[in-house]
Image: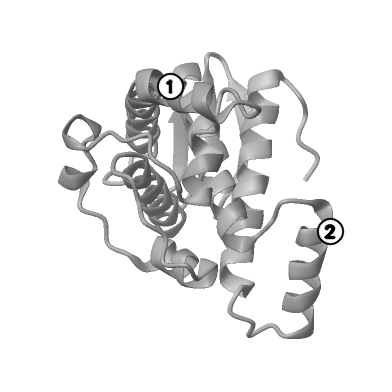
Amino acid sequence: MAKPFKKHGDRYVGHLDGTERAVLARLIKQTRALLAPEVVPSGDPWEDLDALLDRAVDDAAADPAEAPRTADEPRDPALARLLPDAHRGDPKVAAEFRQMAEQDLRQHKYATFTRALEALQIDDVPDDERIELTRAQAEALVVALTDVRLLLAERLGLHTDEDVGDVERAVRADPSHRLAYPLGVYDYLTWLQDALLGALSGRRFLF
């Protein structure tokens, strides 16, 4: 079971069981895959969220070097959160910048996600569930968690504090609500990211 990360010497140590690592790895792989090809949204944000959580990912197809590059609109709103326009006030300039820089950004993010996946040690979970990260691995995992949370937030429609409150109230009123599981995943990712950031910054994590 997950426990907050703490700094021990030059390592950042926490505890993640096999299931937690598998969920994290799956979400990171799926976010990485989304960044490789342009993805056409289904039009139903809840179906898109279900697909994010349930779709099996073919890593070979997620290679950004083989993915088509395009700067065309409209874009998947979730992808726009991960690859925001550099010039929001000028669509033409934004499109030109995307054409020049977006593929490099995708490649950089892909490499970061790969480092985060390696850090999870998914194929070698020790009996005590201990996970030790170098600073570079911890930073890669924080960046990956940031993008996964951005993607989930977009799929859940969480753009403001009011949106978060609305979804939380809906789930409290109906624990079987279809958003209960993805909201739980989102909250878990938030907790884990905060714990890891706390360890990196030297801030004491209180719970």
Depth check, front residue: 139 or 11: 139
**Disc 2 on helix, strand or loop?**
helix
Q: Residue at x 26, y 55 (%)?
A: 57
| Amino acid tagged 2 | Glu
Q: Is residue 135 left or right of residue 22?
A: right
Q: Is residue 184 above or below residue 113?
A: below
Q: Residues within 10 Å of mark 1 (few under 14, many from 20)?
A: some
- Residue occupying image coordinates x 57% and y 65%: 182
Residue 195 vs 202, above or below: the answer is below
Q: Is residue 46 above or below residue 101?
A: below
Question: In front: mark 2 or mark 1?
Answer: 1
- Residue 125 shows in the view: no
Q: 142 or 123: which is nearer to us? A: 142
The disc at residue 123 is none
The Cα–Cα distance between marks 2 and 1, rounded to whole angstroms, is 35 Å
Image quarter (top left, top right, bottom left or bottom right) of the N terminus: bottom right
Q: Nearer the viewer, residue 186 or 4?
A: 186
> The residue under label 1 is which amino acid type?
Glu
The residue carrying mark 1 is: 96
Q: Which residue occupies the extreme top position in the image?
A: 10
Q: Is residue 20 left or right of residue 61?
A: right
Residue occupying the point 46% across, 72% down = 47
Residue 98 rendering spot, x and y as whole percentages:
42, 25
Q: Quadrant of residue 163?
A: bottom right
Residue that badge 2 annotates: 162
Residue 72: name its quadrant.
top left
Which one is earlier in the sequence, the residue at label 2 or at label 1? 1
